[in-house]
């Protein structure tokens, strides 16, 4: 059993960690919100035109890439038709073949340029902003007319050339990833509502009355 002193220390740590996350959330500014709405517009335009939204990242960011792609292809908040979302992190044969025959830094770039088309969107997720394979994918995609979005930590660093940069107000890797998840859910919730407004919850269940106004 854990003694009382240890429990109090653990509770104190948990409290402090939650407070730090709250502080990070309070760091969002109007510039962040403007960036979010701009990315929503780009994704909606892309999907309406028959395009797809691709996602890439490493480690925890790879998990988020798969999570976000699934939210589009399946659903997030309510039943509606599927939308085109694709994670470049899931095909083990492609990933290992490209890494073996070319380089690990090419694993996302070759998929993005092979599968992507002009007008598609590529979301590059990197807490550090320096992941070589993610940076390479962004650079290659932009050369093919693919719209690029960077989700990074406080400094976008090597991903600053993206068409849209969503830099989280934190330098803590774990918190950056948590903020990515929150922002990603907000973006995809708006995309869902704008693409499929007739399916959105109406004013009875939603304080925003999405079903009536979109």
Image (cartoon, rainbow, N blue to C red):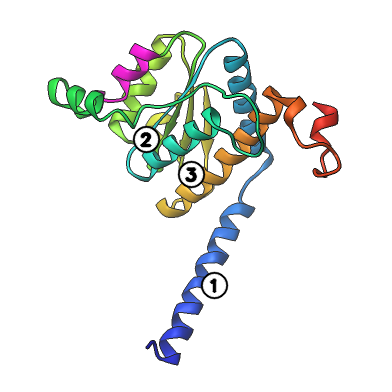
Check disc 3 and report the residue beneath it.
154
Can you say whether 205 is above or below 45 in the image? below
The answer to which of 73 and 8 lies nearer the viewer is 73
Please report whichever mark, 1 or 2, sits nearer to the chain's N-terminal start: 1
Check disc 2 and report the residue beneath it.
57
Q: Are marks 1 and 2 in contact (CB under 8 Å)?
A: no
Please report whichever mark, 2 or 3, sits nearer to the chain's N-terminal start: 2
Q: Residues within 10 Å of mark 2 (few under 14, many from 20)?
A: many
The answer to which of 131 and 190 lies nearer the viewer is 190
| Cα separation between marks 1 and 2 | 30 Å
Helix, strand or loop for the magenta stretch, by majority: helix
Check disc 1 and report the residue beneath it.
15
- Mark 3 lies on a secondary structure that is loop
Magenta residues span 106-115
Measuring 46% from the left and 14% from the top, which residue is drawn there? 146
Q: Position of residue 162 (x, y in %)?
A: 47, 24
Q: Position of residue 72 (x, y in %)?
A: 54, 29
């Amino acid at each position: 059993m854990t003694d009382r002193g240890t429990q109090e220390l653990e509770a104190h740590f948990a409290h402090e960690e939650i407070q730090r996350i709250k502080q990070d959330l309070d760091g969002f500014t109007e510039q962040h919100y403007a960036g979010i709405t701009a990315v929503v517009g780009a994704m909606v335009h892309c999907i309406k035109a028959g395009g797809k939204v691709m996602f890439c990242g490493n480690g925890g960011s790879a998990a988020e890439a798969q999570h976000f792609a699934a939210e589009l292809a399946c659903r997030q908040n309510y039943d509606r038709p599927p939308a085109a979302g694709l994670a470049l992190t899931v095909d083990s044969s492609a990933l290992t073949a490209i890494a073996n025959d070319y380089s690990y830094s090419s694993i996302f770039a070759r998929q993005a340029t092979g599968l992507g088309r002009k007008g598609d969107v590529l979301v590059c997720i990197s807490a550090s902003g320096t992941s070589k394979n993610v940076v390479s994918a962004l650079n290659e995609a932009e050369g093919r007319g693919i719209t690029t979005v960077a989700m990074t930590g406080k400094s976008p660093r090597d991903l600053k050339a993206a068409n849209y940069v969503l830099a989280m107000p934190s330098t803590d890797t774990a918190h950056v990833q948590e903020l990515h998840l929150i922002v990603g859910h907000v973006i995809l919730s708006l995309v869902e509502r704008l693409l499929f407004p007739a399916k959105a919850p109406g004013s009875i269940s939603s304080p925003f009355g999405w079903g009536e106004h979109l």
